[in-house]
Image (cartoon, rainbow, N blue to C red):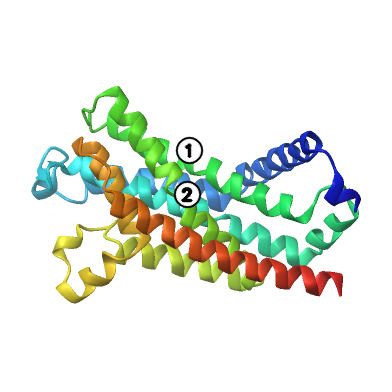
Amino acid sequence: MTRLGQPLPIALQTVAAFVRLELRRVVRNRRYLIFGVAFPTVFYLLYTGVLSGAAARSDAPVDGTTWGAYFMVSMATYGAIVAALGGANLIAQDRASGWTRQLHVTPMRPVAYVLGKLIVSYVVTVPAVGGVLLVALAVNHVDLPPATWLEVLTVLALGALPFAALGLLIGYVFGPDGAQGAVILSFLALGVLGGLWAPISSFPESVATIGRVLPSYDLAELGREAVRGAAVDPAVVLALAAYAAVISALVGWRYRAAERRSDG
């Protein structure tokens, strides 16, 4: 009853303290730094400046923008997805170590744990996205208005909610070893089929049809619309919101099941 009846300011302070603790854990996590921040940035530089050759130079026109800007959004989206999914491993480790059960004897409510994890998943997408945008500006000299740079960063970070929720779901479904495999499979499938590694227009039509319904494709489209200066497509926003709602409902189901097992 104490956990349920605590004043709101204390609850918020508890979540804030938990978020700070979790952010320190993430910063010390080499997988996040390598796969979420460094890998998308390095691959963007390689693919736009070394591996692709003249046929896909950074200033070549692609889909209403340049290849440097187009692939910038792709790799920034990929970084956001990897960063958002990374919470799955920490949740699985917490469950396996008994840390989530230990929280029951603290003033922090269990729901604050889930909320804190979700907030952390959001926060860590910013460096993952920002790293790619920074090298696009500094190395490939992608030319966008200041407001557009901010819009791209904002829509890609905020639009990562379905992937943050997916990370929570994986963490509650799998153990530490299974969660790692599920995360790798998820971001590879979302990246490849969602058209983040190559324009989806280059896919066979049957594969492209699958790719266009994935949230990774929708998130990248939001970023590309911002780059092109186009208005946000409400259908894309609704699709991402629907994914977030469905996955969040599944998270709630698994969370309640885990809580019942803990109480039992």
The answer, for residue 131, to whether it is visible in the render is no
Q: Residue at x 13, y 43 (%)?
A: 57
The residue at which mark 2 appears reads as 36
Q: Does 181 appear above or below 16?
A: below
Q: Which residue is mark 1?
A: 127
Between 159 and 69, the one nearer to me in the picture: 159
Mark 1: secondary structure: helix
Amino acid on which disc 2 is placed:
Gly
Residue 89 visible to an observer of this rendering: yes
Above or below, 194 against 31 in this view is below
Q: Residue at x 62, y 72 (%)?
A: 173
Which of the labelled discs sits on residue 143, or is there none? none
Q: Is residue 10 left or right of residue 91?
A: right
SS class, disc 2: helix
Is 175 left, or right, of 201 in this rendering? right
- How dense is the environment of label 1, judged by Cα within 10 Å: few (below 14), some, or many (20 and up)? many
Numbered circles on residues, count: 2
**The quarter of the displayed image where residue 242 is located:** bottom left
Where 90 sits versus 152, above or below? below
> Residue drawn 20% across and 35% down?
229
146 with respect to 153 (left or right): left
Nearest the viewer among 141 and 159 is 159
Residue 202 position within the rendered picture, expressed as x and y whole percent measured from the top left? 14, 63
Q: Amino acid at mark 1?
A: Pro
| The C terminus sits in image quarter | bottom right
Q: Mark 2 packing: few (<14 Cα in 10 Å), some, or many (20+)?
A: many
- Name the residue nearer the viewer: 195 or 140: 195
Q: Are marks 1 and 2 in contact (CB under 8 Å)?
A: yes
Residue at image point 83% right, 55% down: 103
Q: Position of residue 15 (x, y in %)?
A: 73, 42
Relative image position of residue 204 (x, y in whole percent): 15, 73
